[in-house]
Image (spheres, grey):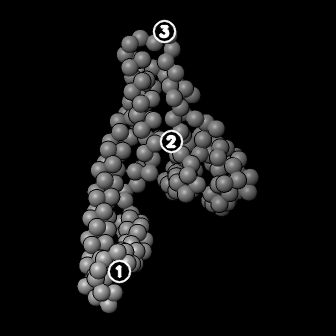
Amino acid sequence: MVSIVKIVNDIKNNGKYDALLDKVKIDLSNDNPTFKDMKILVENDPYYVAEYKSLNRWGELSSIHIKELHINEDDDQEVSIFKKQINKNMVYLKNAEEYELKQKSIFYLSWTLFIAIPAVFILDNLVRVFTPLDPTTKDSIFISLIVVLVSATWGYFKIAQNHKKQHKKYIQIQTDTREMISVGLNKGFFTSEEVYLTE
């Protein structure tokens, strides 16, 4: 869902992508590469699109370069429905962009532990303060530890399962939308300039 023209424009003119621009200069052996040369390089080397998306993800920027399609008065019903569906899909794809990548188990696991470990101490203190158990009773500590770890493990699996489901849905809608855009361009429902961002 990216526009190569926008990627090249961003690499060439936006300081956020200076590291990519430096790599382009090295790969092209040219300190002042032309837009055309950069475009050919970016189209032929998947590294640039992947790195561009990665930089955007860390910078919380979208890598979806599809505009909202304008529905014209002279559009027939088929074109109008077609454009509305693409627009609907694009809203979902932009809002759920985090699901484009498969889950990183270590990320969810680290968040689970980040929640679980302090919770063990909190529960232990609550047990000691608000129950008649003897503060020296080790059972209360072990019980609270087990409760937290079981809850955290269950939460981890639920979150991981949800991400897997959302990733599958995201990839399917992304694939369907790409096909729809290709069909729309081939049938002349809209032009490349109407659908893709360039700046």
Which of the 4 image quadrants contains residue 125?
Answer: bottom left
Residue at the far right: name it: 32
Image vertical order of residue 133 relative to residue 176, above or below = below
Q: Amino acid at mark 3?
A: Asp
> Observer-nearest residue: 178 or 26?
178
Q: CA distance from mark 2 to mark 3?
A: 28 Å
Q: Residue at x 40, y 34 (%)?
A: 89
Give the alpha-carbon distance from disc 3 to disc 1, as whole Å: 73 Å
Residue where numbered disc 2 is placed: 64
- The earlier-in-sequence mark between 2 and 3 is 2
Residue 161 visible in the picture:
yes
Q: State the residue position of label 3.
A: 74
Identify the amino acid type marked 2: Ile
Three-letter code for the amino acid on which mark 1 is drawn: Arg
* Residue drawn at the location 29% of the way across and 80% of the way down: 132
Secondary structure at badge 2 equals loop
Q: Secondary structure at mark 1?
A: helix
* Quarter of the figure with the C terminus: top right
Tell me whether the residue at label 3 lies in contact with that at label 1, contact meaning CB atoms closer than 8 angstroms.
no
> How far from the left and from the top, in percent, is residue 75?
45, 12
Q: Which mark is residue 128?
A: 1
Q: Give how far across and how far down residue 35 sits, in percent.
A: 67, 44
At label 2, counting other C-alpha atoms closer than 10 Å, the crowd grade (few under 14, some 14-19, many 20 or more) is some
Give the mark, 3 or 1, whose residue is nearer the N terminus.
3
Badge 3 local density, few (<14 within 10 Å), some, or many (20+)?
A: few
Please count the marks in the image. 3
Which residue does the image show at 41% across and 30% down from the upper left? Answer: 88
Residue mark closest to the camera, 2 vs 1: 1
